[in-house]
Amino acid sequence: MKKAVTEKDIEAGQKDGTFVVVRDMLLTPGAREFASRKGITLKYAVEEPPRAAAPLKSEALEKLIEDIVVQEVTRRAAASAGSGAAAAPPAAAAPAVSPPSPTAEPSSGPPLLKADAAMDQSVCLSLDAQCRETMLNLSRPESTGNRAIVTVVGYNRPGIVARISAVVAECGGDLADISQVILADYFSMIFIVNLDGLEKNNLSFRIFKERLQDEALRIGQTQILVMHENIFKSMHKV
Amino acid sequence: MLFSMNEIHETIRMIEAEHLDIRTVTLGVSLLDAPHGSVDALCRFLYDRLYQRAHRLVECAAQVEDRYGIPIVNKRISLTPMSLVCEGLSSTEEYVAVARVLDQVAQDVGVDYIAGYSALVHKGATTGDMRFMRSIPQALAATKRVCSSVNLGTTRSGINMDAVLVMAESIKQAAELTAHGAGCARLVVFCNAAEDNPFIAGAFHGVGEPDAVINVGVSGPGVVLAALRRMKREGRFGDLAQVAETIKKMAFKITRAGELVGREVAGMLGEPVTFGIVDLSLAPTPAIGDSISDIIEEMGVEATGAPGTTAALAMLVDAVKKGGTMASTSVGGLSGAFIPVSEDAGMVAAALRGSINLEKLEAMTAVCSVGLDMVAVPGDTPVETIAGIIADELAIGMVNNKTTAVRILPVPDAKPGDVVDLGGLLGQLVIMPVSQYSCAGFVRLTGRIPPPITSVKN
């Protein structure tokens, strides 16, 4: 059960104008308004892991690299041994990666060293060509269908997109698309945010929504709505 | 972009400005394995079973509400008809004790209502059923959240007139035992009751249902009204086919939202809860602009109840059903449009200005779900007259092979034209005049009205 945090709690719990919100707290709208009025910053005490690069599934990728390396080594080993031993099947040649190949050149240095640079390049090229698609599929954010539609309406002034997108990024969300219209002094913006990163930060949809709404309160004269894309999908797509 | 700006704005407008909401997420729970005989053992079983099944319902609904930004107005529980579960009990005190347990568990899990204090007596009543029906007034008076319903007739078996009279007495008694007769707002009698209806007060978990299901009732009169007003502004309001088409499209979208919410909540609750049905009914609220009556008036009827009302309503209900059944294969419950008089600001206004009366309402119920709903009559209305009103309404359902119901409040000491505010979603009761001619001779005849010829289909 979450603990409801009211104005009093904020007043008692704040330190140097900052109140730390942990995951088990549920801030009442009154408490939020109070904090905003008193200039108390609401700080969300969730440990943010260093932002990882693309969320690759490492096992699958490692397997892919290994396969390509094995193929390349087999091919080179066979080529350098002349035509005679070239028929070794890839499976048998696989262990040749660490121990020197019995068919390697007898001259100086580890047998595969000379070929390293060329092989690196060749492996990279192979990787590039063969697995780009696979990698993209593994990491493609929109393949999950876990996105939020964030609609912001309010009085226009500089820095709004920056502030909203900063909060999105801080939560681990990823902006997939933005559309905006400015009419006289008012703006209307729609952000599509990929939510896959939220889980890594141990954030629920609710906290994500609350943080954005907190930001809207701080910006002032701004209304923000956060809805999961499925509601739009189900109402407008058959 | 995956969605057009228009689509996104339309959804937001429907929710923010036009009162699109999910009226209810109702968890149906089977109690068929309840122990019989000892009331203590039964009460313990009921509390444990219901707490275990339902304690996460409110939390899950809140999460879905948050995720999609669509309000879920009510969270409810429906039960296997309690008359089946309580058949072994012997006294009214024991029945009331059971009702109190239901009330307690509803309060503890945080749901708005718990329904299924119900009996099915359409062809005949067992000794237990009779005891049960007589216990309803006390059970309602002793509780706040328990809802009761009794099925008195079906197209297949006719109308059990003995039970109609018993229930008319129970309704009068329940009105006397509760302030302003408000207990009767939790009591409804049916013909052709639906086993998967998520709406109060008539919800129960039918015997043909699985262990636990989530049934969803959508709302949305405001959305339909706004769409018709837009048509007028844009000069497209002229051809009836276009009007029907607009209503269909709106009903489609509302239903899709309902199904999404139902599936999501059921998924979150996990085994053994499954998704049941979406009830398409347009359900009004006392909020301004969320009214069926306003839609009828928007269609060009000066005041709801004027000639043309039934035809306009028939078209509205049909369009809603067509749009809704296109949107979901899991359509069930009552699925039509509700015209609860007190819960609909437009209907209250119509009752106050006298454009609508009991007789016109009865005609309207022939083309919509569900029946004479939340109508108030003077407290001194004779039991026989109430039985006659019930019998008339049930006959419409029996002959037309549809669900009809009566939820009537004989408000003690009230006269026609008086207004009683029940507050919340129950709204304002306007006491309606009742025919002064008696039907006592007819309703005191014993036995059953035989089923109509339309029941012989095989």
Image (cartoon, rainbow, N blue to C red):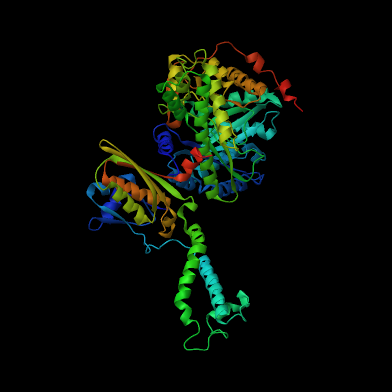
Q: How many marks?
A: 0
Q: Residue at x 73, y 21 (%)?
A: B453
Q: Residue furthest right?
A: B458
For this rendering, which residue is in front, B15 or B212? B15
The image position of residue B153, as x and y in percent, is: 66, 26
Picture quadrant of residue B156: top right
Q: The C terminus of chain A appears in which quarter of the rendering?
A: top right
In the image, residue B308 sits, relative to residue B99, either above or below, namely: above
Out of B268 and B29, give the one closest to the viewer.
Answer: B268
Residue name at image x 69 percent, y 18 percent:
B445
**Image: A113 above or below B216:** below
Q: Which residue is at the front of the view, B267 or A141?
A: A141
**Which residue is most to the top?**
B437
Q: Quadrant of residue A13?
A: bottom left
Q: Position of residue B60 (x, y in %)?
A: 49, 47
Whether residue B451 is visible, yes or no, is no
| Residue B115 screen position, x and y as percent | 56, 37
Q: Is residue A159 above or below residue B432?
A: below
Taking the image as shown, residue A167 lies to the left or right of residue A15, namely right
Against B296, residue B136 (above or below) is below
Q: Is residue A202 visible?
A: yes
**Residue A155 image offset from top left, x and y in percent:** 26, 39
Seen from the viewer's position, the closer of residues B387 and B339 is B339
